[in-house]
Amino acid sequence: MTWENFRFALFEKAPGALFEHSLIVLITITLAILISVPLGVFLTRPKFKSFGLVTLNLLNILQAIPGLAIIALALPILGLGMKPAVLALLFQSLLPIVKNTIAGLLGVSSDVKEAASGMGMSRRKILLEVEIPLALPIILSGIRTATVYVVSMGTLAALIGAGGLGNLIMGGLSLFRPEYLIVGAGLGAIMAIFLDRVLGHIEYRITPPGM
Amino acid sequence: MIELMQITKQYSGQTLPAVDKLSLFIPQGEICVLVGPSGCGKSTTLRMINRMIEPTSGMIKINGENIMNTDSDQLRMGIGYVIQQIGLLPHRTIAENIAIVPRLYKWPKDRIKKRVEELIVMMGLDLEKTWGKYPSQLSGGQMQRVGVARAMAVDPPIMLMDEPFGAVDPIARTHLQDEFLRLQREIKKTIVFVTHDINEAIKMGDKIAIFDAGRLVQFGTPEEILTNPINNFVEKFIGHDRVVKKLNLFRAEEVMQPVGRDMRKNEFKVFVQTTTSLPDALSLLLEYDVDYLGILKGEELCGILSFKDIRKHVYRKEGE
Amino acid sequence: MTLKDFINFLTKNTGTIMEYSKNHFTLVLLAVTISLVIWVPVGLLLTKNDKWAARVLTLANTIFCIPSLSMFAILVAIPYFGLGRKSALFALVLYAMMPLIRNVYDGVKNVDRNVIEAAKGMGMSSGRIMREILVPLGMPIIFTGFRITVVMTTGIAAIATYIGERNLGRFISEGLVRSNTPMMVTGALIISVIAIGLDTILGAIEKRIVPRGLRINR
C-alpha cells in the first residue's frame, strides 16, 4: 500500500465515481418513489384489493432474486450502461416502498377515516389529508430500505458498465490494489450508512409525537 | 392471614413514594378490597404480596412467615393470581392453561386432569366444549372464569385479584361477582382484591381499604366506611349517595318488623321476599305509593316493612 | 441467446454446476449455522436489557447498510482475512446479525406483556417463561428472520465469487468477463431459482409454524 496510490484513488478517481454513484441512486430512488407510492395507493383502493395481493406476491418473488443475478439478467436484455443498471436496480427497489405504502395506508384506523368522511371530506381529500400524512412515516421507512439497497447493489452495477464506486472496488480487486478497494468500499459504506441515518432522522421527525 | 408492616415502595426518579409506610392486617378467610383512584398504590401493594414488586422497606408476613425468606417462584406458585387482562397463554388450550401451576408442582397427570375438569365445572363452563379450546375462541366473561380457575388450580389459601372483573361488560361483571361471592362462601380463601370501583368494593369486601396517594386512608367493613367516612376524601370517593349505597348492604329481613299469625296477607297490597335489598324495597314503596310492604318467606307472610323502619335503621347506624 | 443455448450449457457443464452448487450450499449452510448459533442467543439475551439492545441493534443496522461488495473488499484488504472462505464466511455472518437479532428481539418483545405477567405471577421461572412462552409465541417472527437470513445469504454468497469463492456466482463473473451470455444467464437463473425456491418453501413453513391457538378465531 502506498500513500501515492491512496491519494490517487481518493482525489483523482473517487470524486467522479462518487458522483456517478449518487446519480444512479438518485435517479433510481426518484423513479421508484414515483412508481411505487401511486401503485401502493392504487392497490389499497377497495376495488383493486384482489389485484393488490397478486402484485405483492409477484414483487415478493422479485425481491428474493439476488442482486447479482438481476444485474446479470439485465445485461443481455437491456445492454450495457447506466440506463440498464438503473432499470435493473429499479426492479428490486419497488417492493419495499409499495409494501410499506400499502401497510401504512391499511394501518390508518378506520375510525379516523370514518370520522373524516363524517365531517364531509371527499375520498380524495381523505386520502391526501388524512391517510397519506398518517402513513408517511411507514412509507418513508420503505424508501429508506430501498435507498440503502440501491446504494449497495449500485456497486454491482459497475459490472454492466454503469460506473460508480463499484468501478473502484472491481478495479482494486482485479489489480490487487488495496488502496482502491479501501477508498471505493469505504465510500460506499459511508454513503449507505449516511443516507440511512439521514432518512432515519427524517422518518423520526415526521412521525407525529403521538405515535 | 397476611400482615403488611410499614411497607414503602419508592421508585427511583420519583419524589413521592408509590406506597408510603403502609400497615395492613388481612385476616384468614376474608376478602379485603383495596380501592382508590388510579395511581394510589393499590396495585403496587397487591403486587408486593407475591413479590412481583419488591418493597423498598418494611416487611410482609404470610402466616407469620416473612415472604422474603421464600424463593419468589415458590411463593408465587402458592398464591393464586388473577389480573384484569387475564394473560391466558394463547398457544395453550384452556385445559393446559388451568394445568400450569399443577404442572409446576409436578402433579401426576391423572390428578391434574381430574382437577382441571373439576375447576371447569365449578366455574360454570361447559366441560366438553371448553376443554380443548384456545383462549381466542372464548368470550371475555368465559376467559375471566378460566383466569380465576387457573389461579385456584392448586387450591391456594391466598388469592390476589387485580381488577379481575374489570374487562367485561357490566352485566357479565355482576354475574361474575355474584358467582364468585357464592363460591367464596364455600372455599373461604384469604383474598386481596383490587378495584377502582367503590360499588364493587362495597359488594365484594368483608373489609375495605381506601387508598390515596400511596397511603391507607381508611380501613374497615363496608358498613363502617359508609357510616363514618373518616375525611373529605373518603366521603367524596364514596359519593353523595352513600346512604343509598349503605342500603345495599341490608336485606328486607334485617330491617322488617316481624308479625304474628294474627296478620293476614290480604291486608297488604305489595309483597317482597325476605332477601330483597333495601333499595329495591324502597323503590317499591315509592312506586306503589304504599305505607308498608308485606315481607314473604316463600309463600308465608313473616314481616312488615315501612318507610319509617328503613329510616330508623339508617338513622340507628349513623348514630353509632 | 435461446433456450437451446441454455440447455446446451446445462448438459455440457453438469460437473461444474454440481461443483459450484456444492460450494455454494456448503458456504450458505456454514454461514447460516454459525449465524444461528451466535445471533439467536444474543437476540434472546438482548431482550433482558433494553439499553444494550438499542446499541447492538444500531450496530447491526449499520453493518447491514454496508454494500456487500464493499464488505468483501474491506475484509480482503485486512491481512488476517484476505481472499477466500474466511472473509466470505465472516461477511455473511455479519450480515445475518441484523435480520436474526432484530427478529428474535422483536418476536420475544411482541409477546403480550400480560401473558408474561400472569406466567410470572404463577411462579414460572424466567427460564421456563423463555422456553414455554416467549420462544414459542415469538417463533413466527423469529422464523421470518431465519427465512430472510437464508435467502439473503444465498444471494450475497454469489458475490463472494469476487473474493475467490468458486460457487454459482462464478458463472456470472466469468460470463461477464468472457462475454459468455449463456454462462452468465444460466448462473443467474440457477441462483434465482434457488433463492425463490428457498423463499417459497420457508414461507410456506412460516405460515404453518404459527401456534394453533393464534391461528384459529372464533
Image: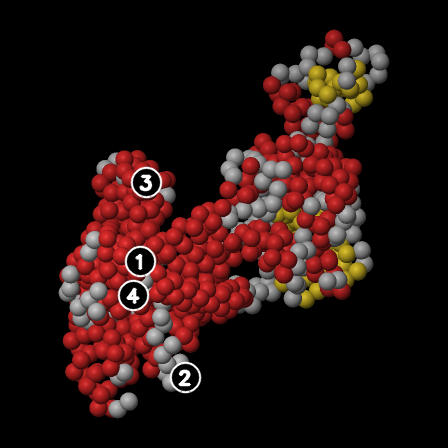
- Badge nearest the viewer, 4 or 2: 4
Q: Quadrant of the N terminus of chain C?
A: bottom left
Q: At 22% from the left edge and 40% from the top edge, which residue is drawn?
A: A124
Tag 1 residue: C10
**Residue A163, visible in the rendered structure:** yes
Would residue A53 be found to the left or right of residue A8 on screen? right
| Chain for numbered disc 1 | C
Tell me the crowding category of disc 1: few under 14, some 14 to 19, or many 20 or more residues within 10 angstroms, Cα based.
some
Tag 3 residue: A113
Q: Nearer the viewer, residue B309 or A16?
A: A16
Percent x, y for residue A123?
24, 38
Residues under labels 2 and 1: Cα distance? 38 Å
**Vertical relation: A137 (above or below) B69:** above
Residue type, label 3: Lys
Residue type, label 4: Phe
> For the residue labelled by badge 1, is the local secondary structure a helix, a strand or a loop?
helix
> For the residue labelled by badge 2, is the local secondary structure a helix, a strand or a loop?
loop
Q: Which mark is residue C171?
A: 4
Would residue B109 be found to the left or right of residue C201 on screen? right
Residue type, label 2: Tyr
Residue type, label 1: Leu
Kindly give the residue lying farthest to the right in the view shown.
Answer: B261
Tag 2 residue: C80
Q: At 33% from the left edge and 51% from the top edge, which residue is drawn?
A: A61
**Vertical relation: B236 (above or below) C64:** above
Marks 4 and 3 on same chain: no
Tell me the crowding category of disc 4: few under 14, some 14 to 19, or many 20 or more residues within 10 angstroms, Cα based.
many
Say which quarter of the image contains residue C6: bottom left
Q: Nearer the viewer, residue C183 or C116?
A: C183
Tell me the crowding category of disc 3: few under 14, some 14 to 19, or many 20 or more residues within 10 angstroms, Cα based.
some
